[in-house]
Image (cartoon, grey):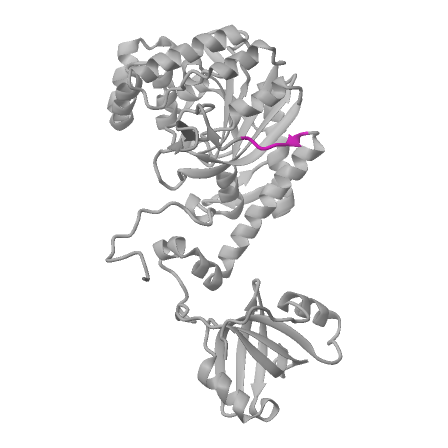
Amino acid sequence: MNPYPHKYDFGSSVCEIRAKAEDHLPDGEVSTVGRVMAIRSHGGMTFIDLLDDGSKLQCQLRMDLLGRQRYDFFSMYVERGDFIGVAGRLFYTKMGELTLEARRFELLSKALYDLPGQWYGLKDVETRYRKRYLDLLMNGGVREVFKTRSSVAAGIREFLSGRGFLEVETPLIQEYYGGATARPFTTHVNYIDETRYLQISPELYLKRLVIGGYNRVYTISRNFRNEEIDVTHNPEFTTMEAYQAYADYNDIMELTEDMFASVAEKTLGTLRFEYDGLEIDLNPPWRRTTMYEALGELAGLQVTDMDDDEMAGTLKKADPDNYSKLMARAGYNRGLFIAQLFDHFCQGRLKQPTFVIDYPRETVPLCKPHRLRPELIERFELFISGMEMANAYTELNDPLLQHELFLEEAKRGGGGDPEAHPYDADFVEALRYGMPPSGGLGVGIDRLVMLLTGKTSIKEVILFPMMRRLTRGSDSLI
C-alpha cells in the first residue's frame, strides 16, 4: 500500500465534530482526520487519541466492526505519530467522553520517527526551540502562545485601521540602512552587482510615504539587526511602525496608551494582569518622566551638574563593558553616556508603564529638537516591567538639519562606529520636497506578546528563534 496518499476526503474537523456534539450527537456516520497521539489496546478493542489542529477526539476500533484483517493491520502498522482518516458513528462512553466508533480507517501519512514520550513530553528548552514542530505537538500551552501572538497582530491592525491608518509594505532589502542604531546584515544583489542591507527599520521609507501624501501609515514587518541574542533580543524580530502627520510625541503617547489598552482588552479581557510576579496596570494615563528626572530619582545622578570627566568615570565604574563598547564605537559622547547611565541604573526598575521622555540629542539623528531645550530631542521610550516596549519621536522634517546630522553620523561611521547611520541622500532629497510635522511610533511586537502571555524570554514567542548551529557529524540525512 502507499503510506503517503495524495488526498483524503472527510466530512468535518475534530473541532467541528466536538462543537456540533455539544448540541446533539449527529445521526449517521461522520468522518475526520488527525494524528494518532496515544494508543490503548484491550484484547479485540483499541482506543486512540486523535489530534487535529489542537483538538483531541477519542476513537474506538473494534475487531468485530472492522474485521480481523483491518484490525490486525492497525495493530501491526499504525503507531503514535501517524496520520489517519476515520469514519464511523459518535457516542459517549460511560465516563462521558465523546468517542468515534470506527467503521473504516485509512493510513494517510506514516511517521518514521517516534514522538517524544507520551507521559514525559518535550521539556528540554533548547530542543523545544530547535524543533518547534515537536514543541507545538507535545505542549498545548505553546500553541496558545502563538494563537495569542496572532490575536495581538490582528488587534493592532484593527485599532490602527479604526484610527484611519493605512497598512503598507516597505522594502526589506535596502540601499542604505537607517532608522535605528544597529549593525546591519549585509547582502549582495548579483544582477546589479551592488551591496544591499537587510532592513533594520522601515522608518525612512514610511516617512517618504508621509511626504507623498499619506497622513497616517503603518507597517508590521521584520527587522534584522546584527546584534546580541538574549532574553529580550533576537537578530530577526517583528515591529509595528506608524507615522501620523500633524502630530507630535505627546499625541503619539496617547495613541500608544490607547493601542496597548485596546489590544490587551481584546486579548486578555482585562488591563490588569500579572507579569513576572508583579501586577501590571495598563489603564491610562501612564506615568511620564524625563530621562534626567529618572536618573535623579532612581540613581541619584544629577547629570546636568556632572562634568565630562565625572560622567565618564561614573559609567566606567558602574558599567565597564558598555563603557568600553561606547568608547570603541564613538569615543566619548556626552549624550550617549547619559543614555547608557539611564540604561544601566534605571531601565530595569521601571515596572509599571512609564514614558521616559526628552533624550539627549546625540542619541538619535532623526528626531526633532526639543522646542524648549535644544540640547534635547522630543523622543520617548515606553518601559514596562523593565523592558523597552516602544520608541517614538516628534519627527525631524527640517532637510537642512537632517543633512547636517547625517553628515555627523557618516563622520562617526568613517571613524569606525559600526552603528552610525550612512548618509541617505535620497531621503534628504525627499525631505526637501516638504514633510508635514509628524509623530512616529515603533512597537516591538515580540515583547508585547511576551508581556501579554507572561513569558520572560523572547524565544518563547518567536516560532523559530535564532540558535547557534549544532556541531555534529553531519547536518544531512543523505
Q: Would you say residue 157 sits in the magenta stretch?
A: no
The residue lying at 63 percent from left, 72 percent from top is 32
Quadrant, the C terminus: bottom left
Along the viewing direction, whichever of 406 and 288 lies nearer the viewer? 406
Does the image show residue 367? Answer: no
Q: Quadrant of residue 21?
A: bottom right
The residue lying at 44 percent from left, 71 percent from top is 111
The residue lying at 59 percent from left, 93 percent from top is 64
Picture coordinates of residue 101, whole percent (x, y): 63, 83
Along the viewing direction, whichever of 314 and 405 lies nearer the viewer? 405
Picture coordinates of residue 473, whole percent (x, y): 23, 58
Picture coordinates of residue 179, whole percent (x, y): 47, 23
Q: Is residue 346 found left or right of 431 in the rendered image?
A: left
Picture coordinates of residue 369, whole percent (x, y): 51, 10
Direction front: furthest residue:
191
Above or below for 255 versus 114: above
Above or below for 157 versus 327: below
The residue lying at 44 percent from left, 7 percent from top is 404
Magenta span of residues: 165-170
Along the viewing direction, whichever of 160 and 277 lies nearer the viewer? 160
